[in-house]
């Protein structure tokens, strides 16, 4: 009987609630449920056979034994012709790193660098044909219109790095041809700062947070710290430490520093200005806030407890603005993160092993880094990618090879030992096999 809409919603709500409770993550629960499933099959074999026979006229058979002898293997084969579209903030790396995986797996590639990093896009288009086989690897430069045209084509795989908004456009286009996608997207990466349950080297922590926010591309990094979660009683101390460290890194006047990047273009400058000029957000500025449109410069800026429904707390910031969100208890950080889209990265500064375990099992994110920022990007033995709204799939190191390969299952049979019970007409003797 077909289920009514309300019934589906109720069931879904219960499934979500059960998943949130964490019970399905325990090994004991999984084993119990799988044992119960075996029991279900054993207890109900007759009913299952009867239902299959009534629905499909089937004579269920236990096949694996009948296929003896056989051998199996998995062979990686290239998908074929792949499209790689990249973002502007690390324009060379984000184009070449997936290209390495695509070539290693044996694909031909169309690369579309971001139009916003104009010089890098030209460099890639001019230089790649001088070194690589231009019959197999091509670069197409252009903006949104070119990307739209590319997405109308049929590809065997699309690898996209960019925003969740465009990621969804890419996935819709891919769905038309059932093309597999890897989406390396963004989102809000929180840094949990557990200062109270165990003594941290707080100066190192603050340096790593400032480094993870401003030092690389002035906040325009997908894996940069988007906001800090900390207990209320530590907020004042943290703000002072952040200010001192910003001064140490960029001097009294960061605009004069040669160690800080500019905002990529006017569009993004205005986007960030709008986030800051929201009156409720403006009141939350406790450091910085200087904007210089002519030089596309925004000073490292710290906010204390901006409203959680302001755009700055609902959208990826992708710029040099660092909100601090205070909590009564650092344990609340888990619920805070879980009530929002799954982050690309969670950074957690803590020495408390119990809390670490709670974060590992109680949250979901592309990666989870304890006591540092950004370094995971350089570690080739770990997969790099998001989950949920922060992405689909992963790459880096041998994961890049896997991402651009199809794992084909191959089974080899011999002509030796032909067992007749696998073939009709069925009779009681054959049904015993
Ligand atoms: P973007 O989504 O605006 O653009 C990415 C690519 O999509 C570009 O090549 C662009 O030409 C194309 N594009 C843009 N709009 C399009 C449209 N309407 N239709 C078809 N194609 C379109 O992203 P961006 O501004 O270049 O980069 C910033 C975003 O990328 C942030 O969200 C950031 O977190 C994310 N990012 C993720 C990673 C990662 O590895 N996960 C790395 C860098 C950046």
Image (tube, helix red, strand yellow):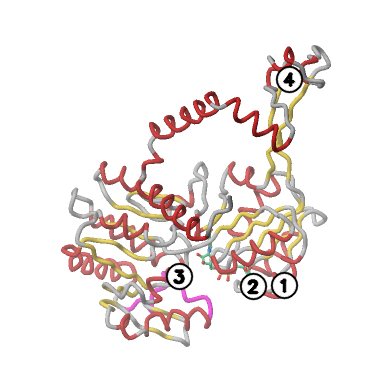
Report the residue marked by disc 4.
67
96 and 322: which one is in front?
322
Classify mark 1 as within 8 Å of ligand 1 or not, answering yes or no. yes
Q: Position of residue 429 (x, y in %)?
A: 73, 12
Q: Quadrant of residue 74?
A: top right
The correct choice, above or below, for 50 with respect to 15 in the image is above
Determine if the C-beta at disc 4 is less than 8 A from ligand 1. no
Residue 56 versus residue 157: which sits nearer the camera? 56
Element under disc 3: loop
Q: Is residue 111 above or below residue 276?
A: above
What residue would you read off at disc 3? 318
Residue bounds of the magenta highlight: 253-265
Instruction: Kindly tell me whether mark 3's CB lies below 8 Å from ligand 1.
Output: yes
Nearer the observer, 209 or 363? 363
Q: Considering only order in the chain, which callout, 2 or 4, is on the residue closer to the N terminus?
A: 4
Marks 1 and 2, how far apart at CA: 10 Å
The answer to which of marks 3 and 1 sits earlier in the sequence is: 1
């Amino acid at each position: 009987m077909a289920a009514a809409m309300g019934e589906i919603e109720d069931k879904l709500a219960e499934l979500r609630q059960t998943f949130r409770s964490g019970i399905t993550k325990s090994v004991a629960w999984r084993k119990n449920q799988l044992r119960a499933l075996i029991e279900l099959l054993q207890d109900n074999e007759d009913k299952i056979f009867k239902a299959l026979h009534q629905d499909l006229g089937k004579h269920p058979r236990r096949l694996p034994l009948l296929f003896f002898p056989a051998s199996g293997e998995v062979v990686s084969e290239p998908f074929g012709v792949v499209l790689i579209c990249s973002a502007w903030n690390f324009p060379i790396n984000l184009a070449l790193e997936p290209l390495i995986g695509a070539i290693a797996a044996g694909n031909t590639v169309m690369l579309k660098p971001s139009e916003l990093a104009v010089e890098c896009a030209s460099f890639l288009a001019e230089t790649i044909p001088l070194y690589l086989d231009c019959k197999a690897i091509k670069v197409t430069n252009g903006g949104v219109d070119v990307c739209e045209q590319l997405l109308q084509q049929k590809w065997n795989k699309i690898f996209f790095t960019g925003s969740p908004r465009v990621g969804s456009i890419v996935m819709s286009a891919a769905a038309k041809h059932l093309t597999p996608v890897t989406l390396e997207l963004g989102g809000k990466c929180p840094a949990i700062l557990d200062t109270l349950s165990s003594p941290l080297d707080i100066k190192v922590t603050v340096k790593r947070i400032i480094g993870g926010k401003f030092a690389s591309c002035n906040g325009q990094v997908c894996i940069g710290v988007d906001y800090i979660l900390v207990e209320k009683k530590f907020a004042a101390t943290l703000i002072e430490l952040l200010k001192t460290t910003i001064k140490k890194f960029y001097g009294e006047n960061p605009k004069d520093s040669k160690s800080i990047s500019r905002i990529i273009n006017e569009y993004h400058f205005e986007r960030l200005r709008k986030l800051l000029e929201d009156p409720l957000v403006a009141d939350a500025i406790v450091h910085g806030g200087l904007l210089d449109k002519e030089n596309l410069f925004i000073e490292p800026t710290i906010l204390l407890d901006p409203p959680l429904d302001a755009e700055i707390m609902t959208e990826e910031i992708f710029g040099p603005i660092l909100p601090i969100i205070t909590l009564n208890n650092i344990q609340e950080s888990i619920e805070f993160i879980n009530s929002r889209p799954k982050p690309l990265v969670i950074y957690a500064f803590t020495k408390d092993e119990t809390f670490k375990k709670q974060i590992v099992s109680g949250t979901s994110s592309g990666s989870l880094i304890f006591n540092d920022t950004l370094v995971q990007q350089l570690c080739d033995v770990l997969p790099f990618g998001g989950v949920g709204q922060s992405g689909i799939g992963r790459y880096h190191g041998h994961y890049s090879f896997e991402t651009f390969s199809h794992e084909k299952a191959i089974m080899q049979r011999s002509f030796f030992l032909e067992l007749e019970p696998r073939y009709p007409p069925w009779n009681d003797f054959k049904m015993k096999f």
